[in-house]
């Protein structure tokens, strides 16, 4: 392969990645990752058999562009299914030609990256960043190339552009893109409104006990272990979507951990503290207040991984209190961590350590930006176009408000999670990790377990969740719901539900074998889970408590508590 031509292609890709200033601002490290991966790909092509595939793609691209020029002069252009160009304005004048030339260039750019022939991780990373860079170059992202923007500016006498500039300045000041009308929500007023009280508090957590709504309740209370990277109130987002309210309506006692946003007090905490002062402390407080011999644990995302680790090293005093453990979109096996894998390798971990050393925490905004990169058009560019180029205010959306209400993680906790679990995949290896001065052994997790995965989850692939169940000493229940990481799990109320779930498959084989043998049921998985709890952990009822807390754990504050409202810097 000609080195001058390789350099030309490399320079072209690097220039494309740098072109859009807003993209560069959204991800300061992503551009360099793309450049590094592309340079590695270009060098690997020298003398490689993949050069033939590259040449075919490049030749095809040139031929298609030549054809477009000829057809464009004649006024013809192919239709598109890309929603970015769905408005009729893209079919008028020069815009069909502009749009189609971009689509051809973006496709060639991605195809060239996909055919680089790198090692698996480097190839996945290059392909990912090539798509991100290609998406950033869309003419819809530029005011002077977007006919919808120009038309709106003309209709409003330029007011839309002025409003958009003001929106951009406001977002630059606060440090992130506005995705919802934030003035429409307030935690404790129209979010997280289920009545309850904080009955336990330490430096790391508050435990909320919710008021029962039925005369009788299950003897085993449910303790929720939410992810510590997000606020707990996704489980109580509003009256119509709240999982907490549903569980109460179905006759359960519900307790909730509210993690403190990592700041001065907790920034030096690691996994040991999150287990002892978090999970174990909450178990003790819940069991004492509920006067329960057993309790059922419900976790989600990294709260599930934390609970798995805790169960593997849990002292007998707390373990004897656990009737069952449920894991929503949680991983024990990190062999395929989904799209997040593109951010995790030695070079990127080492680079981010400098950020951790300075900030002392993994800032919540950093984590939110990384997650947004996974779906850059929906999570970034769509809002850039509407907010800044069209001058519109996003409509109120409670889930997006919660998503923007980020939480820091202690640097020590974050590094251990990424290096030992995501990168090293050591949680599943017997004795490879040590927590609470105890070797972490998955075979010690001998309580009944329920794993719930979602078909559209881009953070925890469902097959990875399934593989985690095979590492436990006793057979676990596995259920697969339609929907995504949030929409299929904690937002899945049975009322007016259009989703479905799969359950009851043959657990002796692969994930594909399980799916082929599973039974499909329409609606939410929530009732199925409650039935499993009754059958597995007990359905004994007791009289609901008349008051919250007790003498040892008196009411400290009304729900949703104080920690969820603390204002902690999220940008490091």
Image (tube, grey):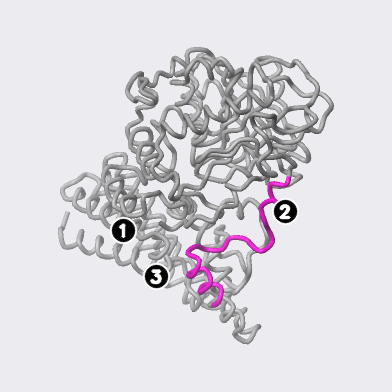
Mark 1 element type: helix
The residue sitting at 32% across, 23% down in the picture is: 432
- Residue 495 sits in quarter: top right
Measure the alpha-carbon separation of dots 1 and 3.
27 Å
Residue 197 locus on image (x, y percent): 69, 40
Pointer 3 residue: 21
Left or right of residue 262, residue 232 in this image: right
What quarter of the picture does the C terminus occupy? bottom left
Q: Dot 1: within a 10 Å radius of its alpha carbon, few (fewer than 14), some, or many (20 or more) residues?
A: some
Q: Which residues are magenta?
A: 166-193
User: Disc 1 or disc 3, which is closer to the eye?
Assistant: 3
On whether residue 192 falls in the magenta region, the answer is yes
The residue sitting at 54% across, 68% down in the picture is: 385
Pointer 1 residue: 58
Whether residue 79 can be seen here: no
Residue 487 locus on image (x, y percent): 63, 42
Q: Which mark is residue 93?
A: none
């Amino acid at each position: 392969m000609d080195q001058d031509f390789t350099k030309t292609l490399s320079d072209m890709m690097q220039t494309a990645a740098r072109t859009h200033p807003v993209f560069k601002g959204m991800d300061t490290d992503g551009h360099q990752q793309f450049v590094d991966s592309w340079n590695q790909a270009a060098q690997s092509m020298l003398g490689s058999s993949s050069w033939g595939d590259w040449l075919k793609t490049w030749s095809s691209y040139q031929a298609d562009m030549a054809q477009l020029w000829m057809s464009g002069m004649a006024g013809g252009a192919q239709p598109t299914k890309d929603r970015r160009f769905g408005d009729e304005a893209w079919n008028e004048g020069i815009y069909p030609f502009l749009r189609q030339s971009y689509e051809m260039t973006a496709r060639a750019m991605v195809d060239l990256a996909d055919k680089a022939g790198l090692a698996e991780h480097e190839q996945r990373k290059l392909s990912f960043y090539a798509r991100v860079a290609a998406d950033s170059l869309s003419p819809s992202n530029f005011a002077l190339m977007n006919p919808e923007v120009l038309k709106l500016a003309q209709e409003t006498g330029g007011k839309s552009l002025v409003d958009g500039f003001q929106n951009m300045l406001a977002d630059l000041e606060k440090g992130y893109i506005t995705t919802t009308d934030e003035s429409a929500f307030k935690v404790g007023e129209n979010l997280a409104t289920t009545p309850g009280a904080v009955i336990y508090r330490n430096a790391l957590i508050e435990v909320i006990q919710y008021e029962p709504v039925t005369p009788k309740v299950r003897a085993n209370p449910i303790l929720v272990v939410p992810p510590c990277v997000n606020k707990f109130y996704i489980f109580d987002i509003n009256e119509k979507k709240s999982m907490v309210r549903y569980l109460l309506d179905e006759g359960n006692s519900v307790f909730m951990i509210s993690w403190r946003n990592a700041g001065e007090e907790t920034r030096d905490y690691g996994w040991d503290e999150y287990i002892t002062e978090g999970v174990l402390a909450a178990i003790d407080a819940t069991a004492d207040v509920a006067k329960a011999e057993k309790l059922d644990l419900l976790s989600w995302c990294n709260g599930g991984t934390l609970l798995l680790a805790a169960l593997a090293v849990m002292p007998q005093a707390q373990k004897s209190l656990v009737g069952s453990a449920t894991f929503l979109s949680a991983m024990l096996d990190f062999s395929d961590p989904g799209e997040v894998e593109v951010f995790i390798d030695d070079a990127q971990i080492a680079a981010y350590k400098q950020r951790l050393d300075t900030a002392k925490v993994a800032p919540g905004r950093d984590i939110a930006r990384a997650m947004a990169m996974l779906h850059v058009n929906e999570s970034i560019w769509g809002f850039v176009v509407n907010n800044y180029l069209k001058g519109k205010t996003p409509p109120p959306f409670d889930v997006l408000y919660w998503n923007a209400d980020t939480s820091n993680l202690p640097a020590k906790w974050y590094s251990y999670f990424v290096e030992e679990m995501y990168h090293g995949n050591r949680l599943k290896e017997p004795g490879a990790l040590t927590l609470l001065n105890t070797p972490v052994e998955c075979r010690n997790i001998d309580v009944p377990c329920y794993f719930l995965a979602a078909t559209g989850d881009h953070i925890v692939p469902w097959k990875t969740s399934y593989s985690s169940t095979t590492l436990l000493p006793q057979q676990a229940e596995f259920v697969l719901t339609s929907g995504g990481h949030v929409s299929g799990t904690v937002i899945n109320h049975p009322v007016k539900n259009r989703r479905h779930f799969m359950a009851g498959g043959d657990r002796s084989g692969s994930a594909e074998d399980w799916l082929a043998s599973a039974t499909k049921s329409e609606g939410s998985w929530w009732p199925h889970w409650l039935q499993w709890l009754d059958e597995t952990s007990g359905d004994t009822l007791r009289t609901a408590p008349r008051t919250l807390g007790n003498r040892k754990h008196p009411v400290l504050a009304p729900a949703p508590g104080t920690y969820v409202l603390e204002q902690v810097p999220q940008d490091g």
